[in-house]
Image: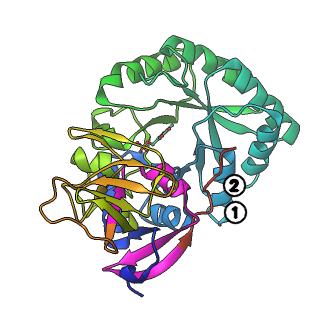
Amino acid sequence: MRVEELDTPTLTIDLDALEENLTRYQAYFTQHGIGLRPHIKTHKTAAIAAMQMAHGAIGLTCQKVSEAEVFVNCGLAVDILIPFNIVGKAKLERLVALAKRTRVTVAADSAYTVEGLSDAAQRAGITLGVIVEVECGMERTGVATPAGATELAQHIDRLPGLELRGFMGYPTPPAVRPILQETIALFDKAGLAREIVSGGSTRHAFEAHLLPELTEYRIGEYPTGGEGHLRAGRHTVEQCALRVQATVISKPTPNRVILDAGSKTLSASTLQTDRGVSMGYLVEYPEARFYGASEEHGHVDVSACAVKPEIGERVQVIPVHPCPCVNEHDEMVAVRKGVVEAVWPIYARGMIR
Ligand SMILES: Cc1ncc(COP(=O)(O)O)c(C=O)c1O
């Protein structure tokens, strides 16, 4: 079957582009001796995670326990990092059950979190690996200072049922090097273990070698690309492997076409471009601007297109943010040179706990 025969809207992934992205990023991290630990939050798909492992990944990153459960259930009982504070009895019980099935390391940024981890690990009779998250400028989670992170690491080191494994930050542009260096110096002074110094983000991936302190790196969006990566020059149009196949269903004015793919297909994510807000990049019409969406309608301004799309025509849309776009779909169709090779279930979609 050819891709043009698929009903729309449909999420597709180009296998040549996917494999090229997996190869070029893995080659970079291998060259620089930094372990690549892909974040599955982007593709949420076991087949791609298996490919990432086959390309040389050291393990996987899963944001949520429920995501990690999916991958282990799919046979990927690999070394898993959960860079998220696990709080609450229900999740702690699932976390320790998971840690009996595969090697798990979990991040924390408070005494509250690590004491919960310690209680759960002791009740389950296991040892849980823990890293401290240190603030690297995002002002989300993370202990505010290297000194505070070291104090929390000492607390982890003393708590039963826990094994301190190091620390992480997100995101980690080269500018955060002093934070990493200071944290390492303080850990070393206190005699604390730091086998893991973990950085992350696709945006700064190819600058990771400027942080030689890193032992490993978490990236999510590199296999798929997206409009943000395209406009920033990190992925070419061809390397943007993830596409939504859509159909023009209406052309109420000469300059406005409506697609059958809206926020329920692409997600409500937007990107600020030099031409205004965008919700996706139309491969066949680079001058078009996908400026808005209702749930099932994509609103596209085609005034700048010399030749304009017509009703019934099919277009391919590169989503601005692949992660929530994938989360809208049950399956992803894997395509090579326009021919359908596989249909992959997106088992980890909706795994929010
Ligand atoms: C903690 C953490 N690490 C790594 C990543 C991966 O970043 P990116 O999607 O830019 O590759 C994310 C993405 O949200 C994240 O939250």
Q: Report the side of 147 relative to 30 (left or right).
A: right
Residue 203 point in image, percent of width and height: 32, 40
Residue under numbered circle 1: 73
* Mark 1 vs 2: CB contact within 8 A: yes
Residue 214 point in image, percent of width and height: 40, 35
Tag 1: residue type?
Asn
Residue density around tag 2, few if under 14, some if 14–19, many if 20 or more, within 10 Å: many
Residue 353 point in image, percent of width and height: 70, 44
Whether residue 105 is visible: yes
- Residue 24, quarter of the rendered image: bottom left
Q: Is residue 199 above or below residue 39?
A: above
Per the image, label 2 sits on a secondary structure element best described as helix
Is 293 magenta? The answer is: no
Which range of residues does the magenta coloring cover? 316-343
Q: Residue at position x 59%, y 65% from top?
A: 330
Q: Residue at position x 44%, y 49% from top?
A: 220
Tag 2: residue type?
Glu
- Residue 108, quarter of the rendered image: top right
Residue under numbered circle 2: 69
Whether residue 21 is visible: no
- Between residues 297 and 184, which one lies in front from this camera angle? 297
Residue 38 point in image, percent of width and height: 47, 51
